[in-house]
Amino acid sequence: MSNHCVGGGAAGVDDLTDDLVAEILLRLRPSEPACLVRASAVCKPWRRLLTDQAFLRRYRDFHGAPPLLGFLHNVAGGGEDRYVPFTASPVSPPDIACPCWVALDCRHGRALLDEFPFSADFTVWHPMAGRRRRLPRPDLPYFMSYAAAVLCSAVGCNHLDCRGGGPFLVVVVGIDEPEQQNSRPWATVYSSDSDSWSPTTSDYLNLTLTPNCDVDRKPAALVGDALHFALAEGSGIIKYNMGECSLSRIHPPVVYKGGIVVMAMGGNLLGLGGIEGSILSLWSSDVSLDGGVRWEKNRVIKLESLLPSIDCVEAVACELAQPAPIGFVDGADIVFVRTDAGIFMIELKSMCVRKVCERGYFKAVFPYTSFCTPGVHLQQNRVQFSRKRLLELREGDVATGMQSNGKSHKGRQP
């Protein structure tokens, strides 16, 4: 027997069977979470269905990769509006007092933020849950040139519903003395389970870098069991194999002086994007039998036909205004491109282009993807209401106490 909506429901809603309602709601687009929230307000049976864990698991499996809800960006000079939403969702910018915080990564429902030099800690922020967790920075004497990644470490997790609360890792990769002739990379890993950093991994025998070689603070690419970090000015890629705790360097097919963005591609392949002039080139790599990396150019995109405002002819005085790829959405084939006119989001499958930020000296974009379902939204509302109600009760107790004290003092007056 099916449960029907009784009273207050829309006309005809109570004629729908539970199975039919589930099939309809299953097909609501996750990129518009407000539709799910509105559907949950139709009637109680719909709300029960949309907050049921079994249905939510089916919903996530049906749609696959989590939708893009917004992104964090790093812009020269900092600023308050550092989270840019794409949809109406309960995600609010991180409540951090430091105005100059820097985003280091955004992955598996979490964001990694750095408040140095105002704070000696990193912050792991759970946007959907509205929680933050501080962790100490690695105690290293050469902690200067570095990038980092945060990722879920729950066993068996498919990463479709990483909203926080579970175990996670933070991987930091850096260069010991980037200005020296024989600078070398290092890596260390933080585990939330042990609340500690691992011993530093270094390759002092086989891997040396050229002087002034910095790690570029752009999103890292997770391919298999390895994280890949781009080096500044497109000079290479540092690969950290988490299973082997080893470091290696991958040479790019072309050195793009404006910088590159690394990406995870289908088939556990590493991808790369770079811009030369007004041409965006996308590459994929494969590992040969001898262990070397072979690059293949998959696509060439002429930006001048997509972005009319791009100026690739005149010399650009500021490096951060030069055209460059600064972000990528794994699983969605979306690349973010910085130009002298702002940030543009290019959907590679449909070739749809959207301007998402106005002009500015942007360094990197960290996309935030997650399923925003009514269960989470309603739970957040209950938590916020409970906190607000508790604060009101406390304020009421204080006011009552002050009034009682005033009456007792008044009664003792002659």
Image (tube, rainbow, N blue to C red):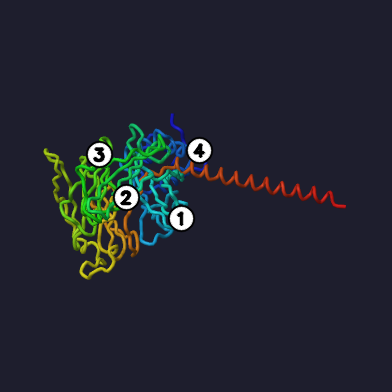
Which residue is farthest bottom?
314
CA distance separating discs 3 and 4: 61 Å
Amino acid carrying label 4: it is Val
Characterize the local packing of mark 3: few (<14), some (14-19) or many (20 or more) Cα atoms within 10 angstroms. some
Q: Position of residue 62 (x, y in %)?
A: 32, 38
Answer with mark 1 or mark 2, whichever residue precedes in sequence.
1
CA distance separating discs 1 and 2: 20 Å
Q: Position of residue 296 (x, y in %)?
A: 14, 48
Label for residue 246? 3
CA distance separating discs 1 and 4: 51 Å
Confirm or deny contact between disc 4 and disc 2 (CB under 8 A).
Answer: no
Among the 4 quarters of the image, the one containing residue 269: top left
Answer with mark 3 or mark 1, whichever residue precedes in sequence.
1
- Look at the numbered disc 3 and give the secondary structure of its residue: strand
As rendered, which of 286 and 45 lies closer to the eye?
A: 286
Residue matched to label 4: 6
- Visible residue check, residue 161: no
* Residue depicted at 22% across the width and 40% down the height: 268
Amino acid carrying label 2: it is Tyr
Q: Is residue 302 above or below residue 61?
A: below
Residue matched to label 2: 146
Depth-wise, is mark 4 or mark 2 nearer the camera? 2
Confirm or deny contact between disc 2 and disc 3 (CB under 8 A).
Answer: no
Residue matched to label 1: 98
Answer with mark 4 or mark 2, whichever residue precedes in sequence.
4
